Image: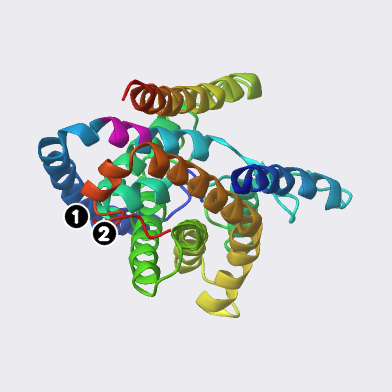
């Protein structure tokens, strides 16, 4: 989902920066609040950043014959809410843009929007929606993180299609072409991200249920599966 | 048990594409999706020229691999440290 440096026209690159900046600003505020109110959650916050670091470095092969990577932003979105991830995800994108020529500074606004805003919000919404419907913890985490991962790539496809509409079939034609690359490749990788996140959160649940209750990830008063 | 099955499924998801995919002649097998998207951009807008270049490019594929490994290793180290801390804390109680 990394749109490469210079691969968005100036107006689009600037526009996505304008869209993403308020989310980053809200994320910084949210981060400050968590660090002061949940002092004990600091280590978990570090672990959430670390999870994005690991997962976004793993380029996995997919059925389409191309490689792509998971995002890792769903884990932290479930624990701390989506706002914080706008900051943590952008830090990873910055690291990759500066040191790996992967993504870019001009395209960071767009890439942050897909990976650090859309993905985490989808995960957060699905997690709490499915919990309310009574789905089990594992299933909820799996569906929320897998679909959040996938939606990040759908968003990238839409961003590129807006910048480079097809001469004949317009936005939709280009959108389908980019989806064929990004979204289809991403399906098995999104499933893998969902499973890894379930394993990690289940481990946390058995070792550190109190903290998860404090963060409102698990309901107070007992674990319901 | 459930965890072991999930780990197995993740490994299968990473390995099966390598076995299942028939590479077409002429195109690089298992290249990055980002590069394929770049090719589509060039196809849709042949006149488009990227207007900035990355400030720094890893000088070789090996160096890029080194940096990606470093990124994964740092992250995995932090996660392992935290899980070890939780496990040790529970034993003490």
> Which region of the structure is painted magenta?
A43-47
Q: Is residue A46 left or right of residue B35?
A: left
> Residue B74, position in %: x, y?
45, 22
> Residue A203, position in %: x, y?
45, 40
The correct choice, above or below, for B34 with respect to B72 in the image is: below
Q: Residue at 23% x, 32% y: name it.
A: A42
Q: Is residue A160 left or right of residue A43?
A: right
Residue receiving disc 2: A19
Asked if residue A2 can be seen in this view, the reply is: no
> Residue A178, position in %: x, y?
59, 63
* Closer to the camera in the image, A45 or B3: B3
Q: Which chain does the numbered disc 2 sit on?
A: A
- Disc on res. A41: none
Residue farthest to the bottom, as pictured: A169
* Closer to the camera in the image, A36 or A177: A36
Check if mark 2 and mark 1 are on a common chain. Answer: yes
Please check the rendered image and state whether residue A45 is part of the magenta-colored stretch, yes or no: yes
Q: CA distance from mark 2 to mark 1?
A: 7 Å
Is there a contact, CB below 8 Å, between mark 2 and mark 1? yes
Q: Residue at 39% x, 23% y: name it.
A: B91
Give the secondary structure at mark 1.
Answer: helix
Q: Is residue A47 left or right of residue A55?
A: left
Residue receiving disc 1: A22
| Dominant SS in magenta | helix
> Residue A224, position in %: x, y?
38, 60
The correct choice, above or below, for A71 with respect to B58 in the image is: below
Asked if residue A27 can be seen in this view, the reply is: yes
């Amino acid at each position: 989902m990394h749109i490469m440096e210079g691969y968005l026209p100036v107006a689009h690159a600037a526009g996505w920066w304008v869209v993403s900046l308020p989310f980053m600003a809200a994320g910084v505020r949210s981060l400050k609040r968590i660090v002061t109110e949940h002092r004990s959650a600091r280590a978990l916050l570090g672990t959430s950043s670390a999870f994005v670091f690991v997962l976004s470095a793993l380029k996995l092969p997919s059925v389409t014959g191309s490689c792509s990577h998971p995002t890792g932003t769903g884990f932290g979105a479930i624990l701390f809410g989506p706002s914080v991830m706008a900051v943590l995800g952008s830090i990873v994108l910055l690291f990759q843009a500066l040191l790996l020529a992967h993504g870019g500074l001009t395209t960071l606004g767009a890439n942050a929007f897909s990976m650090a805003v859309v993905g985490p919000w989808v995960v957060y919404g699905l997690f709490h929606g499915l919990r309310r419907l009574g789905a089990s913890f594992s299933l909820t985490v799996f569906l929320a993180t897998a679909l959040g991962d996938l939606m990040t790539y759908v968003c990238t496809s839409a961003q590129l299609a807006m910048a480079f509409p097809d001469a004949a079939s317009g936005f939709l034609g280009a959108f389908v072409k980019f989806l064929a690359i990004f979204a289809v490749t991403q399906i098995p990788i999104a499933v893998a991200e969902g499973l890894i996140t379930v394993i990690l959160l289940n481990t946390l649940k058995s070792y550190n249920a109190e903290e998860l209750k404090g963060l409102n990830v698990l309901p107070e008063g007992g674990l319901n599966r | 048990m459930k965890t072991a099955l999930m780990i197995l499924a993740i490994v299968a998801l990473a390995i099966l594409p390598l076995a299942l995919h028939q590479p077409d002649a002429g195109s690089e097998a298992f290249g990055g999706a980002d590069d394929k998207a770049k090719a589509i951009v060039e196809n849709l807008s042949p006149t488009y020229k990227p207007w900035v270049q990355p400030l720094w490019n890893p000088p070789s594929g090996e160096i890029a691999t080194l940096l990606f490994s470093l990124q994964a290793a740092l992250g995995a180290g932090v996660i392992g440290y935290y899980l070890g801390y939780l496990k040790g804390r529970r034993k003490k109680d």
